[in-house]
Image (cartoon, rainbow, N blue to C red):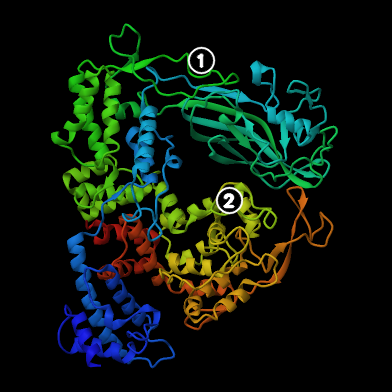
């Protein structure tokens, strides 16, 4: 006793002396040391040896864990004698006071916001905004960023190496190339209209290759309204033959796969904003003929060779409608059809071959099963469109300097021109040639290069470095410019060399913590995932931004801007792990109905739901329980909800007994917390704890083992977990995590409701029957086996029968969900989590937001106004 008391006195030498300090030591001796001394060391904790080293983050974290375990009633264990409430309060008060003093001193010394580099999403957005090139895509060419506390915005996760430098330099070169002026005058707007049965390839002598194959193999049919045109046939030489009546549309049943991509390769596009239009409709098929349908269709635009998805548009049933999207497209070389803009019928299944005869290569007209088809009358591409001229990119690099045609008589070296892809022999040609060989050579003209160079550099560096610059900041880059000019470079090339150096410098790459301009950058990278605009910069220059009313006003302005969509995508992508949606793919045999347009809808649902909560300032209770959802037709069908038609998302009221509503039961979350074959209550339970309740599960011990999915269906996951939990060290954590996951067992790998588990093997029933329906033209290859048990009991002993009851229990504790949400916001916004001494500030934020039922917008704005965000 005396030895331990002395050790505790030494350990807490910074705490108030006297009776309170003895109370800490006596409390530990009475309730903790029996299991946590040098001989026993349960959980690896030796209280006597632990000590108190304020410079040791590990030691500090252990004491915080001791505090929290006692505060939550987890320690001493339930089977041990419970301490008197007053004794526990005295212990916690003294320990918390000491920890707060130590932590506050550390923050005072180190600062709250660490210096970190831009992650790759921020880097791409920064180049886009800075250089005025909204279509820049360099993200996938950069090394993946690390994560800490679930986010890629923390200093300890964002490492940097020579590999990073090489990739980032290449990205900067790509961005500067895209921003290089192309034209003296605004280029003309081109419009191309194309019907899929037209001959457009090889100077109008051939039709699209894939369409020819589809018609030949009869997986595509000619249509006149809702009637099949039997005269449309594939002819020799990749041509289509069509007698009277002439087809007005082509009807497709087959979704894009390795052999089916409709490239609009006859029509070139310049890089820039374009409007993509389609006239089409959906129709039904009843094994042998076209029939009306109630279901809408969908068509997806994109570019195959770069895996770009431009967007999906809704097509009305039975009668054609025109749909349009505006996208930034890059000029392709046209060397292959897959290099061109293309489309695929997203709402069709992957029905192919239709029983093709191997000798003739022909199949039956249409699928041998009921199916949905997409009919296309025509496509149209129009662009490029420019909101202003000169374009933003030209002004970003060269301000008001004119651009003129360059010739050998211009008296200056020929400058580098923007890189255009080189076309192939079949490349689409416009007035500039297949690979741009007929475009004019242009250059930026400066009458006084020695003055214009430093002037433009000073303006550029101010925006690139996100703070005012002085002559000393400009000089190194001005010297690069001067050296390149003396070496014989053209003015614009010399200036771009200096810009290049600036865009890989620490001033550009690093986000620093202190000063008004750091606050402006922190706010913009929080709400826009990109650099501050002129308004924020001016407010930082004047010092006005730090005023609470100004900071709030700017936050509201930024949330109303279209760039706030970046925050929604980035934050939900990391907080709810949506970025991991492609980490596993559902087993095609077990989940054949999972399609790209469903996954697109799942992601859109979660983002739209969060946006709705943010815009309407709805309470965090909606995270786990909501009476509405953001749905479209594929989502509603997936969730078993009637009456929703079309691909466009909208707010839909849910039936009172619906298990849907809130992030907890959204398909995107359910998919990222499962693998492609089976679900795990452990993974889903841990997700609920950490991401929604703010409780970080203890990592499993090294000898915990793993649970392999039983694809044979001989045991349920619950049975396997019960065996696993016979290990006492495992049971302690599983009793906390598993209940949440058990409730979510009522949803499968792709987020569909279930009451029995799917296992491999076709059911003993005829193909096409109710027990073995057609999916993608084939009977299902799975059957239903053991029933799902989604009952459970929370750690506090409260039982629940299903996910509906669990959601009600969770929704009743709004404060816990709000506290966790604030923690995630702070970590995402500042790159560091909530420390012990800052917990009181979190409670103040919660108290301020309580009257608004912890509204999502209120919590976000209160967080921005808090020292947790504003303090460097």
Task: Judge left or right: residue 70 versus residue 601.
Answer: left
Q: Is residue 546 above or below residue 763?
A: above
Q: Is residue 241 rendered to the left or right of residue 271?
A: right
Residue 261 is marked as none
Depth order, front residue of 480/806: 480
Q: Earlier in the sequence, mark 1 or mark 2?
A: 1
- For label 2, the crowd category at 10 Å Cα-Cα, with few meaning under 14, some 14 to 19 and many 20 or more, is some
Quick check: marks 1 and 2 in contact, CB under 8 Å? no
Image quadrant in which you'd find residue 667: bottom right
Q: Is residue 444 left or right of residue 354?
A: left
From the image, tell me which residue sits under label 1.
Answer: 431
Q: Nearer the viewer, residue 46 or 144?
A: 46
Give residue 182's quadrant in the image.
top left
Going by the image, does 265 lie left or right of 228?
left
* Residue 291 location (% of width, % of height): 78, 42
Which residue position holds label 2? 599
Residue depicted at x 57% and y 24%: 335
Disc 1 to disc 2, C-alpha distance = 40 Å
Q: Residue furthest top?
A: 409
Residue drawn 53% across the image and 53% down it: 581
Q: Secondary structure at mark 1?
A: loop
Identified at 83% across, 42% down, the residue is 288
- Give the quarter of the figure containing the N terminus: bottom left
Q: Count neighbours of disc 1 (C-alpha within 10 A) and say few if under 14, some if 14 to 19, many if 20 or more.
A: few
Q: Give the structural element (helix, strand or loop) at label 2.
A: helix
Looking at the picture, how far across and down is residue 112, in whole percent?
24, 59
Q: Percent from the top left, x then y, of residue 76?
A: 38, 86
Look at the picture and state if 503 lies above or below 767: above
Front position in the image: 734 or 723: 723
Task: Please state the total of marks drawn on the protein image.
Answer: 2
Q: Kindly tell me whether residue 657 is visible in this rendering.
A: no
Which quarter of the rendered picture does the C terminus lie within? bottom left
């Amino acid at each position: 006793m005396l030895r331990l008391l002395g050790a505790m006195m030494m350990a807490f030498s910074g705490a108030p002396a006297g009776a309170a300090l003895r109370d800490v030591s006596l409390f530990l001796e009475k309730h903790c040391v029996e299991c946590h001394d040098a001989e026993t060391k349960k959980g690896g904790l030796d209280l006597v040896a632990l000590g108190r080293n304020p410079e040791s983050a590990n030691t500090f974290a252990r004491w915080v864990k001791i505090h929290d375990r006692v505060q939550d009633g987890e320690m001493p264990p339930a089977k041990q004698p419970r301490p008197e409430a007053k004794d526990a309060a005295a212990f916690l008060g003294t320990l918390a006071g000491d920890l707060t003093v130590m932590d506050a001193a550390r923050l005072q010394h180190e600062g709250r916001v660490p210096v970190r580099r831009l992650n790759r999403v921020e880097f791409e957005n920064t180049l886009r905004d800075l250089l005025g090139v909204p279509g820049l895509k360099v993200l996938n060419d950069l090394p993946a960023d690390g994560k800490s506390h679930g986010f890629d915005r923390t200093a300890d996760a964002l490492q940097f190496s020579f590999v990073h430098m090489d990739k980032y330099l290449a990205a900067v070169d790509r961005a500067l190339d895209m921003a290089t002026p192309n034209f003296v005058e605004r280029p003309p707007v081109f419009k191309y209209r194309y019907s899929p049965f037209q001959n457009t390839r090889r100077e109008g002598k051939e039709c699209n290759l894939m369409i020819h194959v589809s018609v030949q193999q009869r997986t595509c049919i000619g249509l006149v309204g809702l009637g099949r045109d039997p005269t449309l046939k594939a002819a020799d030489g990749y041509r289509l033959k069509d007698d009277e009546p002439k087809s007005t549309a082509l009807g497709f049943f087959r979704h894009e796969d390795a052999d089916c991509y409709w490239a609009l390769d006859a029509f070139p596009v310049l890089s820039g904003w374009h409007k993509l239009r389609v006239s089409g409709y959906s129709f039904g098929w009843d094994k042998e003929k076209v029939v009306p349908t109630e279901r809408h269709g969908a068509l997806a635009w994109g570019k195959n060779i770069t895996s770009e998805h431009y967007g999906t548009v809704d097509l009305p049933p039975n009668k054609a409608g025109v749909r349009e999207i505006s996208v930034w497209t890059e000029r392709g070389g046209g060397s292959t059809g897959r290099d061109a803009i293309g489309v695929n019928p997203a709402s069709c299944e992957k029905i192919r071959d239709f029983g093709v005869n191997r000798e003739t290569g022909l199949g039956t007209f249409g699928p041998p099963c009921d199916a949905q088809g997409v009919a296309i009358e025509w496509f149209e591409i129009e662009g490029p469109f420019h909101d202003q001229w000169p374009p933003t990119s030209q002004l970003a690099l060269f301000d008001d300097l004119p651009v003129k045609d360059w010739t050998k008589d211009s008296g200056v070296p020929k400058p580098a021109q923007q890189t255009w892809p080189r076309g192939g022999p079949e490349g689409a040609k416009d007035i500039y040639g297949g690979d741009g060989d007929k475009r004019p050579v242009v250059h930026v003209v400066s009458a006084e290069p020695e003055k214009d160079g430093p002037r433009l550099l000073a303006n550029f560096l101010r925006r690139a470095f996100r703070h005012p610059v002085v002559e000393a900041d400009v000089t190194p880059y001005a010297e690069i410019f001067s050296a390149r000019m003396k070496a014989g470079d053209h003015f614009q090339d010399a200036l771009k060399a200096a810009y290049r150096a600036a865009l890989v410098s620490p001033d550009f790459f690093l986000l620093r913590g202190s000063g008004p301009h750091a606050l402006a950058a922190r706010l913009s990278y929080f709400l826009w995932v990109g650099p501050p605009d002129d308004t924020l910069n001016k407010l930082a220059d004047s010092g006005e931004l730090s005023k609470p009313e100004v900071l709030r006003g700017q936050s509201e302005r930024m949330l109303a801007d279209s760039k706030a969509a970046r925050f929604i995508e980035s934050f939900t992508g990391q907080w709810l792990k949506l970025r991991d949606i492609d980490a596993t793919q559902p087993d095609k045999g077990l989940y054949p109905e999972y399609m790209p347009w469903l996954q697109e809808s799942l992601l859109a649902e979660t983002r739209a739901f969060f946006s709705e909560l943010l815009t309407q300032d709805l309470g965090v209770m909606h995270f786990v329980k909501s009476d509405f959802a953001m749905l479209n037709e594929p989502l509603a069908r997936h969730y078993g909800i009637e009456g929703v038609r079309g691909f466009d998302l909208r707010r839909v009221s849910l039936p009172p007994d619906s298990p849907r509503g809130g992030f907890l039961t959204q398909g995107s979350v359910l998919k990222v917390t499962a693998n492609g074959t089976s679900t795990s209550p452990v993974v889903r339970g841990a997700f609920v704890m950490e991401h929604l309740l703010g409780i970080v599960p203890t990592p499993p011990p090294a000898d915990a083992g793993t649970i392999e999915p039983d694809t044979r269906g001989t045991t349920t996951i619950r049975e396997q977990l019960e065996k696993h939990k016979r290990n006492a060290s495992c049971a302690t954590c599983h009793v906390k995590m598993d209940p949440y996951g058990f409730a979510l067992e009522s949803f499968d790998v792709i987020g569909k409701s279930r009451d029995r588990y799917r296992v491999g093997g076709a059911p003993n029933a005829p193909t096409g029957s109710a027990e073995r329906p057609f999916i993608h033209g084939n009977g299902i290859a799975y059957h239903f086996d053991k029933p799902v048990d989604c009952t459970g009991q929370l750690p506090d002993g409260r039982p629940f029968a299903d996910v509906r009851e669990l959601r009600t229990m969770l929704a009743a504790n709004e404060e816990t969900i709000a506290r966790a949400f604030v923690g995630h916001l702070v970590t995402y916004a500042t790159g560091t989590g909530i420390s012990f001494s800052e917990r009181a500030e979190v409670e103040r934020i919660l108290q301020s937001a309580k009257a608004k039922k912890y509204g999502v917008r209120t919590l976000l704005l209160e967080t921005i106004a808090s020292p947790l965000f504003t303090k460097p």
